Amino acid sequence: MPNDPLLQPYQLKHLTLRNRIIVTAHEPAYPEDGMPKERYRAYTVERARGGVAMTMTAGSAAVSKDSPPVFNNLLAYRDEIVPWIREMTDAVHEEGAAIMIQLTHLGRRTRWDKGDWLPVVAPSHHREAAHRAFPKKIEDWDIDRIIKDFADAAERMKAGGMDGVELEAYGHLIDQFASPLTNELDGPYGGSLDNRMRFCFDVLKAIRARVGDEFILGVRYTADECLPGGTDKAEGLEISKRLKESGLIDYLNIIRGHIDTDPGLTDVIPIQGMANSPHLDFAGEIRAATNFPTFHAAKIPDVATARHAIASGKVDMVGMTRAHMTDPHIVRKIIEKREEDIRPCVGANYCLDRIYQGGAAYCIHNAATGRELTMPHSIAKAHCRRKVVVVGTGPAGLEAARVAGERGHEVIVFEAASDPGGQVRLTAQSPRRREMISIIDWRMSQCEKLGVTFHFNTWAEAEAIQAENPDVVIIATGGLPHTEVLSRGNELVVSAWDIISGDAKPGTNVLIFDDAGDHAALQAAEFLANAGARVEIMTPDRSFAPEVMAMNLVPYMRSLQKLDVTFTVTYRLEAVEKSGNQLVAHVGSDYGGISKQRTFDQVVVNHGTIPLDELYFELKPFSSNLGEIAHDQMIAGVPQSVVRNAEGKFQLFRIGDAVAARNTHAAIYDALRLLKDI
């Protein structure tokens, strides 16, 4: 596609970017000791290898010790970061991509009990809800120190070979100065817009004095906080013009919204079920008003939307950041006219939500992301062709079939249902989670290209499996809802699955006992409440739905609160008994000393799944490994060689929820790391 807008080069000052797609700054939380070591480098380089024009690392790297990361960020205030940065920038440049890094001082967007336990600083005492710290109101000597820290950090990044530095303003200290909501200083840094912008310009001037005029500098900032009393669109436009006219920066990176609360953050970085590219037109307005290089990213998950962003002139460079976590080779596939092979981002936000919960970023359906040192993004062919039989077409089974097919094996798949998908097909019945079905659809299309044979509406019997004379059998039969959790009355309850699938008619006064904390309970609650039921969700935990995580919770809460759903924490459903046409729920507490009764007409239990494993145990005696997976071999990435039954005719493995209730990512990871070596 020589005329494809996305494939046109772009000149940013002296830097020629090879196309119009970037990965914007984000912190996958892979640093070790605050340094971008081998794992971080491998992740970054993979996206450069995939063809992206520029990758921006860190979201964001801390410039000061009183800006301690609240998750595992890079520490740009340490001199020892320079050689690690140099190794990464050299490797990215070798792949033909540019690389920048984002620097920040978090201000109030952190905690005092992290790092060196220094007081949090901000231009007011106002606490940020998300991180809860009450800040010290910043003093003149703090300002001088932090400006120098920014300049020192930028100099380190230039020494490390970075093409440029982006300042993270939105929600962080620079923006806390700029916003009238968070700046209560008296002049020269408070009051008028001139004064509120002074800190940003002082930082930029100090950096320019250190790095010179050629080094690329940009700012990612909010041009409309969407908060009463905050920076509004008119003031945001004025800020944009002043940034351009300062002559200190080379591009604008536009954000709309605020990130001091989970709902605010989710509107800035929308998840599945929310509109695509919600702020693209706004970014286009800024570009039109300033006629200045403009970057933007916010739920631009597909090539068509990205192409529109460039072709329409709304932005100069389009960010596809989460999309590149799902598929780092998007640009290469566009060039090769293989757009249909791009693994789709489904907006599940497993990546970001895991980071904010203190973990590392993983894509819900690409288990190689973040594991580039051990897991392949492209599957190598096997030395000899084998026959692989897979039972089940949920995410584990389909990933097993896809990877085995990529290896060049003959693959036959059995599925009892008429359609693939397992629990994913069920969860995708909820409108907000409809995008999840792409996890299944993409794998089906890949399997069809690879010649995988499917037998739907086929209950796989042990004899039928053996009759195929397989070399390898993969049991990916998933699980069934586990509702047998009460001391009595288990036969009186229904599962969350029963509600979502429509197998159980909604009641009018319903208790959902959620002892799993995942999506199913909230999906069932939404279905019931929309049907007119009065709904209470009860959990023995101290918080509800912990497995759903922060940003995924936001759309549910917006819906469920409007529907007047009640949330009750720290109580346990112990038993249910029938009383006429009503159900009496016996409620206790893990904390002890509580016993009460409540009346409902329907009780729903969400307690995960129990494995559907009968077929596995039937086949086990006939297998050479008796079902054993050598964990050391799997972790080391070498073929499974266990032989426990010399008479066995095939290797047998089970994966996903057929082993134990986990999640979609775990199921796909099981399949990838086992099948890549079969």
Image (cartoon, helix red, strand yellow):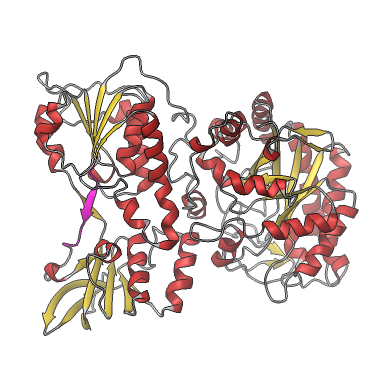
**Residue reaching furthest top?**
383
Residue 175, above or below 38: below
Is residue 361 in view?
A: yes
Residue 483, magenta (yes or no): yes
Asked whether 168 or 147 is in front, the reply is: 168
> What span is colored magenta in the figure?
477-484
Characterize the magenta stretch by its predominant secondary structure.
Answer: loop
Question: For this view, does 244 lie left or right of residue 57?
Answer: right
- Residue at the image point whose x is 73% and y is 57% from the top: 283
Residue 341, magenta (yes or no): no
Expressed as whole percent of the image width and height from the top left, the position of residue 508 reads 27, 81
Asked whether 597 or 609 is in front, the reply is: 609
Question: For this view, does 481 lie left or right of residue 525?
Answer: left
Question: For this view, does 105 lie left or right of residue 32?
Answer: right
- Residue at the image point whose x is 50% and y is 52% from the top: 347
Count every numbered label the image shows and give the total. 0
Is residue 59 in view?
A: no
Q: Quadrant of the C terminus?
A: top left
Residue 321, above or below 95: below
- Residue at the image point whose x is 43% and y is 26% from the top: 379
Q: Quadrant of the N terminus?
A: top right
Expressed as whole percent of the image width and height from the top left, the position of residue 480 reads 21, 53
Expressed as whole percent of the image width and height from the top left, the position of residue 516 reads 30, 60
Expressed as whole percent of the image width and height from the top left, the position of residue 472 reads 23, 26
Question: For this view, does 28 lie left or right of residue 478?
Answer: right
